Amino acid sequence: MTEERKTDWAQRASGGYEKLGWVSANNLLNHMVNLANIQGGEIVADVGTGSQAVLNAISPLLTSGGRAIGFDLSPDMLSRRDEKANKQNVLFLADASAIPLPTQSVDVVTARMVLHHIVQTQAVISEMGRITKPNGKIVVCEYVALDKEVWEFERRVFDIKEPERHLWTGPQLRELVKVGLNGKSPVPGSSLSYAV
């Protein structure tokens, strides 16, 4: 391939996005919701919310004190709120490396199939840690290669299809999250947990 292709996620047409199998895969959404362990009154922020599938799965579990907030870089994706979406979900056009929320203001931060598109992944993970309250949770759902051999094959495929895409094995992604959070909870003495 002679010319490098780069996906512009802010401008990406999202017309077929909802038709991708993993977008509406209930097993992934249910697993994320279970890991988030929503009790009702939490403030939840979804980074790279896209068509708001994660928020739509979580918002019915929230009580009047809870709030579901989504961020995405693409105005087109944010406009794709479907008829099942909770109209109380708050949506922001924002870059994940500069989330417009105060430090330690969110109980649960989710990111589903978005980190592999982000150039400065560790900076975004650090930002997710910044907005998470002490004892809060970060739940990340990403595709990972089963092992190094599979990773090498898939890397060659993505070098042709989507060269800027990140690809990790499970241990590599867990290490990336750990490093992005500076190897510790964002606040001394807190027990921030994260699931990858």
Image (tube, helix red, strand yellow):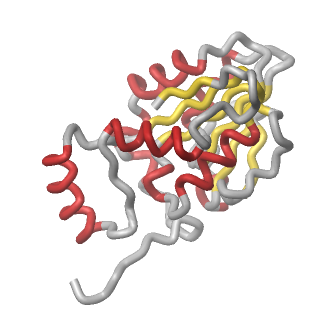
* Drawn side of residue 175 relative to residue 120, left or right: left
* Drawn side of residue 90 relative to residue 137, left or right: right
* Drawn side of residue 161 relative to residue 139, left or right: left
Residue 84 appears in the rendering: no
Residue found at the very far bottom of the displayed protein: 2
Q: Quadrant of the C terminus?
A: top left
The residue located at (76%, 31%) in the rendering is 187
Where residue 21 appears, x then y in whole percent?
34, 40
Where residue 129 appears, x then y in whole percent?
68, 39
Residue 2 vs residue 81, the one in the foreground: 2
Please say if 194 is above or below 52.
Answer: above
Residue found at the very far top of the displayed protein: 39
The residue located at (51%, 35%) in the rendering is 140
Picture quadrant where residue 163 is located: bottom left
Residue 181 appears in the rendering: yes
The residue located at (37%, 46%) in the rendering is 20
Where residue 170 appears, x then y in whole percent?
33, 37
Q: Quadrant of the N terminus?
A: bottom left
* Drawn side of residue 149 relative to residue 181, left or right: left
The residue located at (45%, 21%) in the rendering is 31
